[in-house]
Image (cartoon, rainbow, N blue to C red):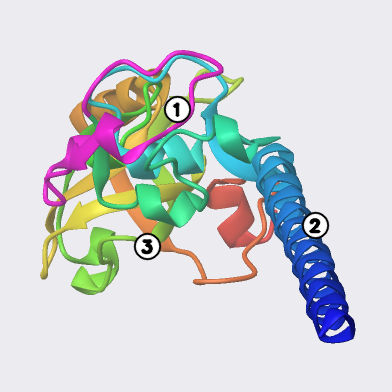
Amino acid sequence: MESILSSKVFATRRGTIMLGIGAAVLAAIALLVYLNHYRNSVNSGVQPMSVLVAKSLIQKGTPGDVIGSTKLFQVTSIPRDQVKSGAYVDPKTLTGKVAAVDIYPGQQLTSVDFGLANVNALTQRLARDQRAVVVPLDSPSAVGGQIASGDRVDIWVLLTAQASNGVARPVVREVLQNMYVLTAGTNGGNVTIRATPKQAGMLIYAAANAKIWLVLRPAVGSTTTQPTQVTSSDLAGG
């Protein structure tokens, strides 16, 4: 009888010890899992992420296309836990949008800072130093009406210039190269050119005092050359 009781007590103690050891092992495993999860969450928070950050002041109303084409932003790597909700990571996401508020240098570009742009408005395709100027042309001067929005053209002007001997003579001169066409009529008429303020003034003066011709450039691979002037001597082989 005494031997049986001793065996039960020993078995109970051994069971208790085994349960204790098992509980300790489970607690250690749980602690390791927690520490590993915590370490991963900390590491993911400090891992860098590339986002778009304003390089200079982006004023309210600035088109997203202009922000992208004029590099008003820069791609910056910052810790993931400092990235704002809705932060832009791809410049292509700016297309068709317009700044809804002023965005200051160093500020992340986020979806809440932008709204949908009026894609038909010319202002959405103009940078701060660009203007839209309308040039009235007949069909031949506009390459037979084959110039379309998005084309690139060289602009030639036919005017009367005074030679060194005092005699007035017609001269054809290339005044501007690689100009961007914003809109164009289907058979001549008005063509809207994107230009700087000075270039706009040159085109207005030429439209009032000379004859303007547009020369269509290739879609790809075109190069800029030294501006050319042609006179009657060139045609006569002089």
Q: Nearer the viewer, mark 1 or mark 3?
A: 3
Q: Nearer the viewer, mark 3 or mark 2?
A: 2
Residue 183 against residue 102 in the figure, above or below: below
Quadrant of res 73: top right
Quadrant of res 13: bottom right
Whether residue 116 is in magenta: the answer is yes
Is residue 113 shown left or right of residue 33? left
Is residue 190 shown left or right of residue 61? left
Name which of mark 1 and mark 3 comes first in the sequence: 3
How crowded is the residue under tag 1: few (<14 C-alpha within 10 Å), some, or many (20+)?
Answer: some
Q: Disc 3 on helix, strand or loop?
A: loop
The disc label shown at residue 161, or none: 1
How crowded is the residue under tag 2: few (<14 C-alpha within 10 Å), some, or many (20+)?
Answer: few
Name which of mark 3 and mark 2 comes first in the sequence: 2
Classified by dominant secondary structure, the portion drawn in magenta counts as loop
Asked if the residue under mark 1 is in contact with the one under mark 2, i.e. CB atoms within 8 Å, the reply is no
Looking at the rendered image, the quarter that the N terminus falls into is bottom right
Residue labelled with disc 3: 151
Q: Residue at x 30, y 28 (%)?
A: 62
Q: Nearer the viewer, mark 2 or mark 1?
A: 2
